[in-house]
Image (cartoon, rainbow, N blue to C red):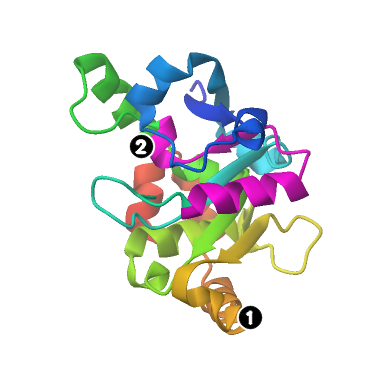
Amino acid sequence: MEEEVCEFYFIDADFLRSRQDTKPLPNFQKLQVESPAAFKRERYSMTQVVTGFHTKEDLIISHRWFQSECPDPDGMQLAAIKNFLKEHKYIERVWFDEWCMPQGNRTDVEQTSFDLMLSNVNMLYLGASVLIHLDLSYQARFWTQFEAWCSMQLPTPQGLKPSRNTTQERFHIRCIQGAAEQSDHHKQFLITDKVGTNASGSQFNQTRDNKTLVEEI
């Protein structure tokens, strides 16, 4: 059986580093019109996830949407991303859902692309570096908790194993909004809560469809 491969859109990290405007970026469709050169495309497969092919150069943002129509209305999350990129110059591409997947009213082509990327999105959180924007409501949402859990796992041919305190640890946590106070406490609580939960090797090996992986865990 041919291995499933999914192509994702990313934003060029240097585009974000060089951006002087403090306003939040527009969504995917508007950004494609305003700054088409900012987009990069990367193909992901489960083999690449297990081998860590994308871990160093790709950064995935796990975050909560602050408003239903706009996840980052005041540009706070963009500022946090830019600060992280300045500290980690080896990052080449950034994935932030609003910028990298079609939003709102989609054309048929955009809907097809969106559905394919959404059904394979777990490959990003399992196979790349992940920056967690931890606010006080982050752990109240299923999807952000699941993203954090995936970011703390090490994919292997035998299954998923905790990556905490290994040379292959690839998650980073930045506390924002109210969580910035007592940030060490909030970080440790998230790590302790997620590292203790693991999936069996048979689960991982048998769930080539990422939607199934979500349902089984």
- Which dot marks residue 118? 2
Looking at the rendering, the stretch of residues picked out in magenta corresponds to 76-100
Q: Nearer the viewer, residue 146 or 107?
A: 107
Q: Residues within 10 Å of mark 1 (few under 14, many from 20)?
A: few
| Res. 5 in view | no
Magenta: main secondary structure: helix
Q: Look at 40% across and 72% down and name the residue there.
A: 139
Membership of 11 in magenta stretch: no
| Residue 50: x %, y % from top left | 65, 42
Return the residue nearer the eye: 185 or 205: 185
- Disc 2 crowd, CA 10 A, few/some/many (<14, 14-19, 20+): some
Q: Relative to 165, say whether 202 is above or below.
A: above
In the picture shown, does residue 164 fall above or below 81?
Answer: below
* Image spot of residue 173 (x, y percent): 61, 64
Badge 2 vs badge 1, beta-carbon distance below 8 Å = no
Q: Position of residue 27 (x, y in %)?
A: 36, 32
Specify whether residue 138 is in view: yes
Q: Which mark is residue 36?
A: none
Depth check, mark 2 against mark 1: the one in front is: 1
Q: Residue at horizontal 34%, vertical 24%?
A: 30
Q: Amino acid at mark 1?
A: Asp
User: Where does label 1 land, which residue?
Assistant: 184
The percent position of residue 96, horizontal first and vertical second, equals: 47, 41
Q: Which amino acid type is shown beneath numbered disc 2?
A: Leu
Q: Residue at 43% across / 36% down in the picture?
A: 25
Displayed quadrant of residue 17: top right
Residue 124 is left or right of residue 89, and the answer is left
Q: How many marks?
A: 2
* SS at circle 1: helix
Circle 2: element type:
helix
